[in-house]
Amino acid sequence: MNKTIRKSILTITLFSGGFLFSQTHVLEGRVLDEKDNSPMQGVTVKVNDKETKTDASGYYVITLDPGKNYSVNVIYKGYNKKEISDVEIKSAENTNLDILLTKIEAKGKDKEIEGVVLRSSAKKETIASTIGLQKNMGVVSQVIGIEAIKKSPDKNTGEVLKRVSGVSLLEGKYIVVRGLSDRYNQAMLNGIQLSSTEPDKKTFSFDLFPASVIETLVINKTFIPEYTGEWGGGLIQVNTKDIPNTKFFNAQIGVGGNSNTIGKDFYTSKGGKLDFLGLEDGYRKLPAGFPSKNAFSLLSDTEKTDFGKQYVKNFGYNNNGYPENVNLQLDGGFNTKFLGKDLGVIAVLNYSNSKRTTNSDNRFFTINGEQADVNFDYKTSKYNNDVILGGLLNLTLKFNDNNKISLKNIITNNTNNHVSIRTGKDFEFDPVNGTNIIAREVGYKQTIFYNSTLTGNHKLNALGGLNVNWYGSFGILDQYIPQLQRLQYNQYPNLTGSPYLALISNGLSQKSGSFFYSTLSDYLYNAGGDVSKSFELFGQKQTIKGGYLFQVKDRIYNSRPFAVQLEGFNQNLLSQPFETIFNQENFGTSGNLFTFDEIAGKQYRYIANTILNAGYLQFDNNITSWLRAVWGLRVENFDQVVGSTKKSDERYVHSAVTDYLPALNLTFKLNDKMNLRLAGSQTVVRPEFRELSPLAYYDFDLGATVIGNKELQRTKLTSADIRWEFYPKSGEIFSVAGFYKNFKNPIELYFNQSGAGTSNTFNYLNADKADAYGLEFEFRKKLDFVSLLQNFTMAGNLALIDNKVKDEATNVNRPMQGQSPYTLNLSLQYDSQKSGFSSTVLFNIIGRRILYVGNEQVPPIWEAPRPLLDYQIAKKIWKNKGEIKLNISDILNQRAKYYHDLNDNKKYDAKDALAISRLTGTNFSLTLGYNF
């Protein structure tokens, strides 16, 4: 796999190197039918004496002189002609102008009036086309267009998504939609469903995609059959650019820091020479000739310990001094002729090196009513060094206006180098007096995400304009943990002069004296296609569409939990410090020295496979000029094996189920400015491999073991939506929506406090059912009614959700894990094209929600509301070719608090038991970009 990374990065770098050249300047965009956003082929786009026609995807391009204003005329038979004035061709980049055309309405039987000329300006048309895309979608959705992305200071997809109604962002990359956690959301790239970027949970990291390569972002909140049926909150569609119409090259470099790290020591684990690139050069790997799990178990104690001496390392670390953050992004593209056809290439190279310190308190309690007695009380400083090295390479070959194929590739290598330093008190070994503890965890994790997709788009005029699309994709998710080390020392305060002694005995433990190694490989294969046909019936446009998807996903997981043990008691050995305790001379088989062994058990490795066959039939019917229905059925047959292929193996889990997923979306066009939408559907959310596997993994941050559950069932969701939309003028919207969701068998993570220390576990379980009722309010209003505020736009959204999990067997009646009762987003944007200044203030807060579900003995752990305030300011420089940006995120820097609500007053106060408290700091970054 490392060879693949090197080759891909080399290819992208070579492409990038060729982009440093002069540019021509073009006007580009798409022409769409205002009624249903369908692309229009053959539309004449005319500027002075130059004209062109749109292709099958509605695209057009005209080369013009920069720095001038033009008028654009758009003409198509049967549609109103449109004249767009004040189109300024930018000197620093391509000018994008998407255009909506309205059909000429007939009056009287078999009579058509002559179309009128609709006049607009470039600014109005740009905003109107983006809002129009949302207005004319057949589903409840939100659209972010290319011009909105260009004007924002956001540098990746995750930051752009923060601006969407009902959407929140966790850790700068994970999406929460309508208060539902990432489990219930799904990502698609260029129409292809993406696998999770995290092997341990169902989520997607949206910071992988640079904002500069995105054409549109579409967030669906209601389901239609042509897209995957495995989601319940939001479906996020990321569409990247296809064929660049001119050569371009952009460079961006940034530096930054965090209030928790600036001017303070920062620690990283000792490693190889390529750690700064996120590449493990073998420093932490298993020694050469290290036996497989079965072969290792047959070795003698001496042979095992000899291998351990080569693998085990002490717990020293590097002190990096001032930990500045650095990021670099290069993106470019060009088009050329290949075998006489148009070939477009877009490439991106992305690098970031960030450092963050999280200071946290962590406590477990024995709870009796409103009385909470501490089982352990830890204070931990965790130093994370995250390095991302990745790239994107898209190639599109356009044979003619009706046929094109594209190959789109993305690869990212993400590493986390961390050191955790802990102090505190533990009552595991002395329930009365407790023991003072010091502990460290030192680890390195490398995750590689790769996806390659080949697509074809064809319009067959010989078959009456039949549209045929096909695709095939291959994805890899590799996770490599070469070494994760843990060691704890205990000291008995009631014994005068008691030293700190390493917690190592004659048993094998994941908590202390542990050395963990693992590899995980996911392989995802997709193949499919669809056929659609549009026609007129009763004077209205109708479309029928059908398609099929075949998907295979394989996983191979193998972990090697090793541990050091000591048969007797050797105080001189156990009292040695972190930096020397595991010197090679301290290992041997004499009984007074450390030995090395592997924790046995099948549960530490598993394989998994899923096969998905999905087909759908969908109708898009304009029943009248004011009523549109998008409806149909998707059928998904899902066959899954987890653990082992042998039925006799206790890890074996097999399920095969066919789901029938109907959908109905109705849009009532009340007038040209108002829509009323009604929708109903069924979808599913399936458990991840990790959640079904029997793997028992000790989590140092939680202080407990996380265990899978082979009995988990999929969650089935039934959804209903109603939404009123009002578009008073270009770029403005007011909407009110209501929704209902029923969750059958929702999956939750339960806290099981069976004792102190390592006997505490977190388990995945199905609840019986849950119901959610919600209201959403959204607005986007320009403040130009006040002359001093003409460059300001205010936007916001509020979601109110009442959610309850009900389980008659356990008498449960509470909110579902991860569901917030409200989410609030507010933004104030300033954008002055004349001065080149833009600025944005963002505010977000979500209501309290359950972090971990409790049981009869221990109440749930709640996450308290935490307000987030971000500020961004940008200035165009160097004749608009450059831009400098300052970003400040989490300005308020309030502690994240997770607590047991002992007095059940639905808020955190001094009477509650604070289980977890974290302070992550305020982030600062300064970025300089230039368009060559």
Image (tube, rainbow, N blue to C red):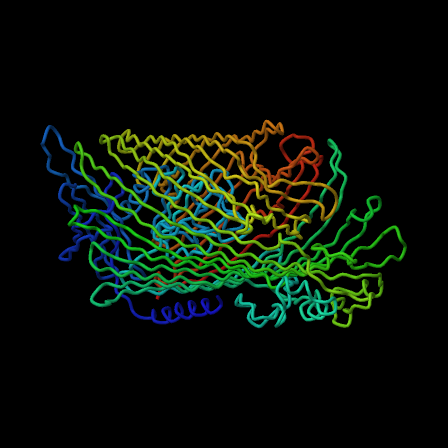
The residue furthest right is: 496
Q: In this view, does 571 lie to the left or right of 74?
A: right
Task: Say which quarter of the image contains residue 213.
Answer: bottom left
**Depicted 621 relative to depicted 691: above or below:** above
Work out whether residue 879 or residue 603 is closer to the camera in this orientation and state it. Answer: 603
Say left or right for 832 vs 354.
Answer: left
Residue at the far front: name it. Answer: 648
Tell me: 896 left or right of 53: right
- Residue 927 x/y as whole percent: 46, 60
* Rendered location of residue 362, percent (x, y): 69, 47
Q: In which quarter of the image is the C terminus?
A: bottom left
User: Which residue is located at x 33 percent, y 50 percent?
Assistant: 528
Residue at 71% x, 51% y is: 379
Q: Where is residue 825 in the image (x, y as percent from the top left)?
A: 48, 40
Q: Position of residue 457 (x, y in %)?
A: 26, 53
Residue 744 left/right relative to 856:
left
Q: In which quarter of the image is residue 535?
A: top left
Instruction: Count the marks.
Output: 0
Instruction: Name the residue at 44% across, 44% down.
Output: 638
Viewer-closest of 124 and 748: 748
Depth check: give the residue in front, 116 or 751: 751
